[in-house]
Amino acid sequence: MSDPLIPVRILDRLRQRLELAFGGGAGEVLAVQAPGRTELAGNHTDHEGGQVIAAAVNRHVYGLARPNRLGQIRLESEGYAPVAIDCDDLGRRTSEEGTTAALVRGLAAAVGDAAGGARRGFDLAVVSEVPAGSGLSSSAAFELAVAQAMNLLWAGGAIHPLRLARLAQQAENRYFGKPCGMMDQAAIACGGIVRMDFNDPRSPQVERLSCDFSHLGYTLCLVAVGADHAANTSDYAAVPAEMQAVARELGRTRLRDVDEDEVLGALPELRRRLGDRAALRSLHYFREERLVERRVEALRTGDMDAFLAGERLSGASSAMYLQNVSVPGASSQPAMVALAVAQELLGGRGAARIHGGGFGGTIQAFVPSGEAEAFCRRMDAALGRPGAAALYQIEQEGASAQWL
Protein backbone atom coordinates (compact mmCIF):
# COMPACT_ATOMS: atom_id res chain seq x y z
CA MET A 1 0.00 0.00 0.00
CA SER A 2 1.45 3.39 -1.00
CA ASP A 3 1.26 6.25 1.44
CA PRO A 4 -0.68 9.31 0.26
CA LEU A 5 1.64 11.49 2.31
CA ILE A 6 4.66 10.52 0.21
CA PRO A 7 5.01 10.20 -3.58
CA VAL A 8 5.81 6.66 -4.69
CA ARG A 9 9.22 7.64 -6.10
CA ILE A 10 10.21 9.09 -2.69
CA LEU A 11 8.62 6.23 -0.76
CA ASP A 12 10.76 3.68 -2.63
CA ARG A 13 13.94 5.67 -1.88
CA LEU A 14 13.01 5.87 1.79
CA ARG A 15 12.30 2.17 2.10
CA GLN A 16 15.72 1.42 0.63
CA ARG A 17 17.45 3.91 2.93
CA LEU A 18 15.66 2.57 6.01
CA GLU A 19 16.62 -1.00 5.19
CA LEU A 20 20.23 -0.19 4.26
CA ALA A 21 20.79 1.89 7.38
CA PHE A 22 18.95 -0.19 9.97
CA GLY A 23 18.17 -3.57 8.43
CA GLY A 24 14.91 -5.07 7.34
CA GLY A 25 13.17 -5.14 10.71
CA ALA A 26 9.63 -6.26 11.22
CA GLY A 27 6.72 -4.21 12.50
CA GLU A 28 4.69 -1.22 11.45
CA VAL A 29 6.21 1.70 9.59
CA LEU A 30 4.98 5.26 9.74
CA ALA A 31 5.35 8.01 7.15
CA VAL A 32 5.94 11.68 7.87
CA GLN A 33 6.03 14.80 5.73
CA ALA A 34 6.59 18.48 6.42
CA PRO A 35 6.46 21.26 3.81
CA GLY A 36 8.82 24.19 3.44
CA ARG A 37 7.49 27.68 4.01
CA THR A 38 7.58 31.11 2.41
CA GLU A 39 7.05 34.51 4.04
CA LEU A 40 4.40 36.47 2.17
CA ALA A 41 4.32 39.58 4.37
CA GLY A 42 5.82 40.91 7.58
CA ASN A 43 9.50 41.47 6.88
CA HIS A 44 11.25 41.62 10.29
CA THR A 45 8.08 42.29 12.28
CA ASP A 46 7.65 39.05 14.25
CA HIS A 47 10.53 39.68 16.68
CA GLU A 48 8.91 43.01 17.59
CA GLY A 49 5.56 41.40 18.46
CA GLY A 50 4.13 42.20 15.04
CA GLN A 51 2.21 40.35 12.37
CA VAL A 52 3.27 38.16 9.47
CA ILE A 53 1.67 36.21 6.67
CA ALA A 54 3.39 32.93 5.85
CA ALA A 55 2.52 29.93 3.73
CA ALA A 56 3.53 26.30 3.35
CA VAL A 57 4.88 25.44 -0.11
CA ASN A 58 5.09 22.27 -2.17
CA ARG A 59 8.64 21.22 -1.31
CA HIS A 60 8.82 18.69 1.51
CA VAL A 61 10.91 16.81 3.99
CA TYR A 62 9.79 13.17 3.91
CA GLY A 63 10.56 10.32 6.28
CA LEU A 64 9.83 6.71 7.18
CA ALA A 65 10.06 5.60 10.81
CA ARG A 66 9.93 2.22 12.51
CA PRO A 67 9.99 1.48 16.24
CA ASN A 68 13.05 -0.30 17.58
CA ARG A 69 13.75 -1.97 20.93
CA LEU A 70 17.07 -0.23 21.53
CA GLY A 71 15.89 2.78 23.51
CA GLN A 72 17.52 4.96 20.87
CA ILE A 73 16.42 7.37 18.17
CA ARG A 74 18.51 6.53 15.13
CA LEU A 75 18.37 8.89 12.18
CA GLU A 76 19.70 8.51 8.65
CA SER A 77 19.23 11.72 6.68
CA GLU A 78 20.31 11.96 3.05
CA GLY A 79 23.43 14.11 2.78
CA TYR A 80 24.15 14.22 6.53
CA ALA A 81 26.03 12.10 9.05
CA PRO A 82 23.98 9.44 10.92
CA VAL A 83 22.64 10.37 14.36
CA ALA A 84 21.93 8.14 17.36
CA ILE A 85 20.36 9.56 20.54
CA ASP A 86 19.73 7.60 23.76
CA CYS A 87 16.17 8.24 24.97
CA ASP A 88 17.46 8.35 28.56
CA ASP A 89 20.18 10.92 27.81
CA LEU A 90 18.43 14.09 26.75
CA GLY A 91 20.35 16.78 28.56
CA ARG A 92 21.50 19.79 26.57
CA ARG A 93 25.09 19.54 25.27
CA THR A 94 26.91 22.72 24.29
CA SER A 95 29.31 20.65 22.19
CA GLU A 96 26.36 19.63 19.94
CA GLU A 97 25.11 23.14 19.18
CA GLY A 98 24.50 23.70 15.50
CA THR A 99 24.16 19.98 14.71
CA THR A 100 21.37 17.62 13.70
CA ALA A 101 22.01 15.65 16.88
CA ALA A 102 21.19 18.73 18.94
CA LEU A 103 17.84 19.16 17.18
CA VAL A 104 16.89 15.50 17.60
CA ARG A 105 17.92 15.47 21.28
CA GLY A 106 16.02 18.69 21.94
CA LEU A 107 12.91 17.43 20.17
CA ALA A 108 13.02 14.14 22.08
CA ALA A 109 13.20 16.04 25.35
CA ALA A 110 10.41 18.51 24.53
CA VAL A 111 7.97 16.23 22.69
CA GLY A 112 8.58 13.38 25.13
CA ASP A 113 7.67 15.62 28.07
CA ALA A 114 4.52 16.77 26.25
CA ALA A 115 3.65 13.11 25.68
CA GLY A 116 3.88 12.41 29.41
CA GLY A 117 7.38 10.97 29.31
CA ALA A 118 6.40 8.07 27.05
CA ARG A 119 9.48 7.69 24.89
CA ARG A 120 10.47 4.63 22.91
CA GLY A 121 13.23 4.20 20.40
CA PHE A 122 12.71 4.34 16.67
CA ASP A 123 14.65 4.42 13.42
CA LEU A 124 14.00 7.20 10.92
CA ALA A 125 15.16 7.66 7.32
CA VAL A 126 14.75 11.16 5.86
CA VAL A 127 15.05 12.77 2.45
CA SER A 128 14.42 16.42 1.68
CA GLU A 129 13.21 18.33 -1.36
CA VAL A 130 13.44 21.65 0.51
CA PRO A 131 16.60 23.37 -0.77
CA ALA A 132 18.96 24.20 2.10
CA GLY A 133 19.80 27.88 2.37
CA SER A 134 16.94 28.84 0.05
CA GLY A 135 14.89 30.74 2.61
CA LEU A 136 12.26 27.99 2.71
CA SER A 137 13.12 26.91 6.28
CA SER A 138 14.53 23.47 5.57
CA SER A 139 15.62 23.17 9.23
CA ALA A 140 12.13 23.92 10.56
CA ALA A 141 10.61 21.43 8.08
CA PHE A 142 13.04 18.79 9.35
CA GLU A 143 12.12 19.61 12.95
CA LEU A 144 8.40 19.26 12.29
CA ALA A 145 8.83 15.99 10.40
CA VAL A 146 10.76 14.48 13.33
CA ALA A 147 8.33 16.01 15.86
CA GLN A 148 5.32 14.51 14.06
CA ALA A 149 6.97 11.08 14.09
CA MET A 150 7.44 11.42 17.86
CA ASN A 151 3.88 12.74 18.22
CA LEU A 152 2.38 9.66 16.55
CA LEU A 153 4.72 7.17 18.22
CA TRP A 154 4.58 8.60 21.75
CA ALA A 155 1.26 10.44 21.97
CA GLY A 156 -0.90 8.80 19.32
CA GLY A 157 -0.90 12.08 17.39
CA ALA A 158 -2.67 13.95 20.20
CA ILE A 159 -0.28 16.93 20.43
CA HIS A 160 -1.77 19.94 18.62
CA PRO A 161 0.20 21.22 15.61
CA LEU A 162 0.80 24.67 17.13
CA ARG A 163 2.08 23.10 20.32
CA LEU A 164 4.43 20.95 18.25
CA ALA A 165 5.63 24.12 16.54
CA ARG A 166 6.38 25.66 19.93
CA LEU A 167 8.26 22.53 21.05
CA ALA A 168 10.31 22.56 17.85
CA GLN A 169 11.19 26.20 18.40
CA GLN A 170 12.29 25.38 21.96
CA ALA A 171 14.57 22.63 20.65
CA GLU A 172 16.12 25.02 18.14
CA ASN A 173 16.56 27.75 20.78
CA ARG A 174 17.84 25.67 23.67
CA TYR A 175 19.67 22.78 22.06
CA PHE A 176 20.68 23.94 18.58
CA GLY A 177 21.58 27.40 19.83
CA LYS A 178 19.65 29.53 17.33
CA PRO A 179 17.41 32.25 18.87
CA CYS A 180 14.71 31.93 16.21
CA GLY A 181 11.08 32.95 16.49
CA MET A 182 8.16 30.62 15.89
CA MET A 183 6.96 31.82 12.48
CA ASP A 184 8.64 29.09 10.42
CA GLN A 185 7.54 26.21 12.63
CA ALA A 186 3.97 27.51 12.96
CA ALA A 187 3.52 27.97 9.20
CA ILE A 188 4.86 24.47 8.52
CA ALA A 189 2.74 22.92 11.27
CA CYS A 190 -0.48 24.58 10.04
CA GLY A 191 -0.13 24.42 6.25
CA GLY A 192 -1.88 26.73 3.78
CA ILE A 193 -1.65 30.50 4.17
CA VAL A 194 -1.73 31.81 7.73
CA ARG A 195 -1.70 35.23 9.37
CA MET A 196 0.17 35.17 12.67
CA ASP A 197 0.10 37.86 15.34
CA PHE A 198 3.07 37.64 17.70
CA ASN A 199 1.85 40.05 20.37
CA ASP A 200 2.16 37.03 22.69
CA PRO A 201 5.18 35.25 21.17
CA ARG A 202 4.59 32.12 23.27
CA SER A 203 1.08 31.72 21.93
CA PRO A 204 0.65 33.61 18.63
CA GLN A 205 -2.81 34.17 17.22
CA VAL A 206 -3.16 32.22 13.98
CA GLU A 207 -5.76 32.80 11.27
CA ARG A 208 -6.02 30.57 8.22
CA LEU A 209 -6.49 32.57 5.01
CA SER A 210 -7.96 31.08 1.85
CA CYS A 211 -6.55 32.41 -1.41
CA ASP A 212 -5.67 30.67 -4.67
CA PHE A 213 -3.00 32.72 -6.44
CA SER A 214 -3.25 30.61 -9.59
CA HIS A 215 -7.00 31.26 -9.78
CA LEU A 216 -6.19 34.98 -9.60
CA GLY A 217 -3.73 34.62 -12.48
CA TYR A 218 -0.38 34.66 -10.68
CA THR A 219 2.36 32.18 -9.83
CA LEU A 220 4.76 32.36 -6.89
CA CYS A 221 8.43 32.28 -7.87
CA LEU A 222 11.42 32.19 -5.52
CA VAL A 223 14.88 33.02 -6.83
CA ALA A 224 18.01 31.87 -4.98
CA VAL A 225 20.51 34.67 -5.55
CA GLY A 226 23.66 32.79 -4.55
CA ALA A 227 24.54 34.57 -1.29
CA ASP A 228 25.85 32.74 1.76
CA HIS A 229 23.65 33.36 4.82
CA ALA A 230 26.48 32.41 7.17
CA ALA A 231 28.49 35.42 6.10
CA ASN A 232 25.76 37.81 7.25
CA THR A 233 24.96 36.60 10.77
CA SER A 234 25.94 39.90 12.40
CA ASP A 235 23.90 41.86 9.84
CA TYR A 236 20.79 39.80 10.64
CA ALA A 237 21.33 40.21 14.37
CA ALA A 238 21.66 44.00 14.01
CA VAL A 239 18.08 44.38 12.72
CA PRO A 240 16.20 43.34 15.89
CA ALA A 241 18.96 44.80 18.06
CA GLU A 242 18.53 48.26 16.53
CA MET A 243 14.73 48.11 16.56
CA GLN A 244 14.74 47.10 20.21
CA ALA A 245 17.28 49.82 21.03
CA VAL A 246 14.73 52.36 19.74
CA ALA A 247 12.05 50.76 21.90
CA ARG A 248 14.29 50.92 24.97
CA GLU A 249 14.98 54.61 24.41
CA LEU A 250 11.21 55.07 24.70
CA GLY A 251 10.89 52.91 27.81
CA ARG A 252 9.70 49.68 26.16
CA THR A 253 11.36 46.44 25.07
CA ARG A 254 9.85 46.00 21.59
CA LEU A 255 8.29 48.22 18.95
CA ARG A 256 4.83 46.60 19.23
CA ASP A 257 4.42 48.50 22.50
CA VAL A 258 5.53 51.86 21.08
CA ASP A 259 3.31 54.34 19.25
CA GLU A 260 4.68 55.55 15.93
CA ASP A 261 4.02 59.15 16.96
CA GLU A 262 6.39 58.62 19.88
CA VAL A 263 9.15 57.65 17.46
CA LEU A 264 8.43 60.62 15.22
CA GLY A 265 8.36 62.99 18.19
CA ALA A 266 11.68 61.68 19.50
CA LEU A 267 13.29 61.30 16.07
CA PRO A 268 16.02 63.97 16.46
CA GLU A 269 17.21 62.45 19.74
CA LEU A 270 16.92 58.88 18.45
CA ARG A 271 19.05 59.75 15.42
CA ARG A 272 21.63 61.44 17.62
CA ARG A 273 21.86 58.59 20.11
CA LEU A 274 21.34 55.53 17.89
CA GLY A 275 22.05 56.70 14.35
CA ASP A 276 19.87 57.07 11.28
CA ARG A 277 19.74 53.37 10.40
CA ALA A 278 18.13 52.39 13.71
CA ALA A 279 15.58 55.17 13.32
CA LEU A 280 14.77 54.11 9.76
CA ARG A 281 14.40 50.48 10.77
CA SER A 282 11.91 51.41 13.47
CA LEU A 283 9.88 53.40 10.92
CA HIS A 284 9.93 50.36 8.60
CA TYR A 285 8.33 48.29 11.37
CA PHE A 286 5.26 50.55 11.59
CA ARG A 287 4.99 50.80 7.80
CA GLU A 288 5.26 47.04 7.36
CA GLU A 289 2.65 46.41 10.07
CA ARG A 290 0.15 48.52 8.14
CA LEU A 291 1.10 46.76 4.92
CA VAL A 292 0.53 43.34 6.52
CA GLU A 293 -2.98 44.40 7.50
CA ARG A 294 -3.67 45.60 3.95
CA ARG A 295 -2.48 42.34 2.47
CA VAL A 296 -4.50 40.27 4.94
CA GLU A 297 -7.63 42.10 3.77
CA ALA A 298 -6.59 41.68 0.13
CA LEU A 299 -6.21 37.93 0.59
CA ARG A 300 -9.54 37.68 2.39
CA THR A 301 -11.32 39.40 -0.49
CA GLY A 302 -9.24 37.95 -3.34
CA ASP A 303 -8.07 41.42 -4.40
CA MET A 304 -4.82 40.53 -6.16
CA ASP A 305 -4.16 44.08 -7.32
CA ALA A 306 -4.24 45.32 -3.73
CA PHE A 307 -2.04 42.43 -2.59
CA LEU A 308 0.55 43.17 -5.28
CA ALA A 309 0.52 46.87 -4.44
CA GLY A 310 1.28 45.96 -0.83
CA GLU A 311 4.09 43.66 -1.93
CA ARG A 312 5.72 46.44 -3.96
CA LEU A 313 5.51 48.92 -1.09
CA SER A 314 6.84 46.32 1.33
CA GLY A 315 9.76 45.56 -0.95
CA ALA A 316 10.63 49.24 -1.22
CA SER A 317 10.46 49.68 2.55
CA SER A 318 12.70 46.66 3.12
CA ALA A 319 15.29 48.02 0.71
CA MET A 320 15.22 51.70 1.70
CA TYR A 321 14.32 51.79 5.40
CA LEU A 322 15.00 48.32 6.81
CA GLN A 323 18.06 48.09 4.55
CA ASN A 324 18.27 44.29 4.55
CA VAL A 325 18.80 43.79 0.82
CA SER A 326 22.52 44.49 0.59
CA VAL A 327 25.34 44.69 3.10
CA PRO A 328 26.63 48.25 3.63
CA GLY A 329 29.95 48.82 1.91
CA ALA A 330 29.98 45.46 0.15
CA SER A 331 30.73 45.43 -3.57
CA SER A 332 28.74 42.19 -3.98
CA GLN A 333 24.98 42.85 -3.95
CA PRO A 334 23.37 39.73 -5.44
CA ALA A 335 19.90 40.25 -3.98
CA MET A 336 19.72 43.84 -5.20
CA VAL A 337 20.82 42.71 -8.67
CA ALA A 338 18.19 39.95 -8.67
CA LEU A 339 15.48 42.42 -7.61
CA ALA A 340 16.52 44.86 -10.33
CA VAL A 341 16.34 42.12 -12.98
CA ALA A 342 13.01 40.76 -11.68
CA GLN A 343 11.36 44.16 -11.66
CA GLU A 344 12.65 44.90 -15.15
CA LEU A 345 11.27 41.59 -16.45
CA LEU A 346 7.92 42.09 -14.71
CA GLY A 347 7.51 45.64 -15.97
CA GLY A 348 5.01 46.47 -13.22
CA ARG A 349 2.80 43.46 -13.98
CA GLY A 350 3.57 41.58 -10.75
CA ALA A 351 5.70 42.24 -7.69
CA ALA A 352 9.13 41.35 -6.33
CA ARG A 353 10.62 41.77 -2.85
CA ILE A 354 13.39 40.48 -0.63
CA HIS A 355 12.37 37.22 1.01
CA GLY A 356 12.71 36.38 4.68
CA GLY A 357 15.62 37.77 6.67
CA GLY A 358 17.29 39.39 3.67
CA PHE A 359 20.93 40.24 2.91
CA GLY A 360 20.91 37.85 -0.01
CA GLY A 361 19.55 34.34 0.03
CA THR A 362 16.28 34.59 -1.88
CA ILE A 363 13.92 37.05 -3.53
CA GLN A 364 10.21 36.42 -4.00
CA ALA A 365 8.19 37.32 -7.07
CA PHE A 366 4.55 37.06 -8.07
CA VAL A 367 4.49 36.57 -11.83
CA PRO A 368 1.56 36.51 -14.28
CA SER A 369 1.04 32.78 -14.76
CA GLY A 370 1.36 32.89 -18.53
CA GLU A 371 4.84 34.43 -18.18
CA ALA A 372 6.09 32.32 -15.26
CA GLU A 373 8.26 29.78 -17.08
CA ALA A 374 9.81 32.41 -19.32
CA PHE A 375 10.46 34.58 -16.26
CA CYS A 376 12.40 31.74 -14.62
CA ARG A 377 14.49 31.13 -17.75
CA ARG A 378 15.35 34.81 -18.09
CA MET A 379 16.19 35.17 -14.40
CA ASP A 380 18.51 32.14 -14.57
CA ALA A 381 20.22 33.56 -17.65
CA ALA A 382 20.63 37.05 -16.19
CA LEU A 383 22.09 35.71 -12.94
CA GLY A 384 24.21 33.06 -14.67
CA ARG A 385 22.77 30.43 -12.32
CA PRO A 386 20.74 27.65 -13.97
CA GLY A 387 17.92 26.54 -11.68
CA ALA A 388 18.10 29.65 -9.49
CA ALA A 389 14.45 30.51 -10.16
CA ALA A 390 11.74 27.99 -9.34
CA LEU A 391 7.94 28.02 -9.31
CA TYR A 392 5.96 27.06 -6.21
CA GLN A 393 2.43 26.32 -5.14
CA ILE A 394 0.82 26.72 -1.73
CA GLU A 395 0.70 23.42 0.17
CA GLN A 396 -2.56 23.14 2.08
CA GLU A 397 -1.54 20.33 4.44
CA GLY A 398 0.83 21.03 7.28
CA ALA A 399 3.31 18.60 8.80
CA SER A 400 1.69 15.21 9.38
CA ALA A 401 2.33 11.53 10.08
CA GLN A 402 0.40 8.32 9.60
CA TRP A 403 0.93 4.57 9.81
CA LEU A 404 1.36 2.75 6.52
Image (cartoon, rainbow, N blue to C red):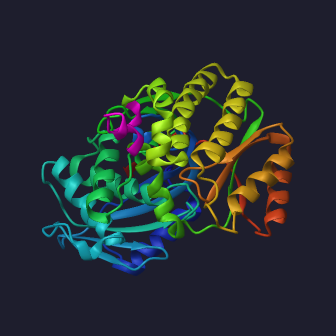
Direction from residue 368 to residue 317 in the image, left or right: left
Viewer-closest of 329 and 402: 329
Question: Can residue 23 be seen?
Answer: no
- From the image, which quarter does the C terminus lie in? bottom left
Viewer-closest of 82 and 169: 169
Q: Is residue 354 above or below residue 226?
A: above
Q: Which image quadrant is residue 353 in?
A: top right
Viewer-closest of 73 and 210: 210
Where residue 320 appears, x then y in whole percent?
65, 45
Q: Which image quadrant is residue 307 in?
A: top right
Where residue 193 appears, x then y in whole percent?
54, 35
Residue 214 painted magenta: no
Span of residues in magenta? 245-256
Residue for point 53% across, 70% down: 231
Direction from residue 384 to residue 365 in the image, left or right: left
Where residue 398 appears, x then y in whole percent?
46, 43
Question: Can residue 244 be seen?
Answer: yes
Residue for point 55% across, 41% down: 280
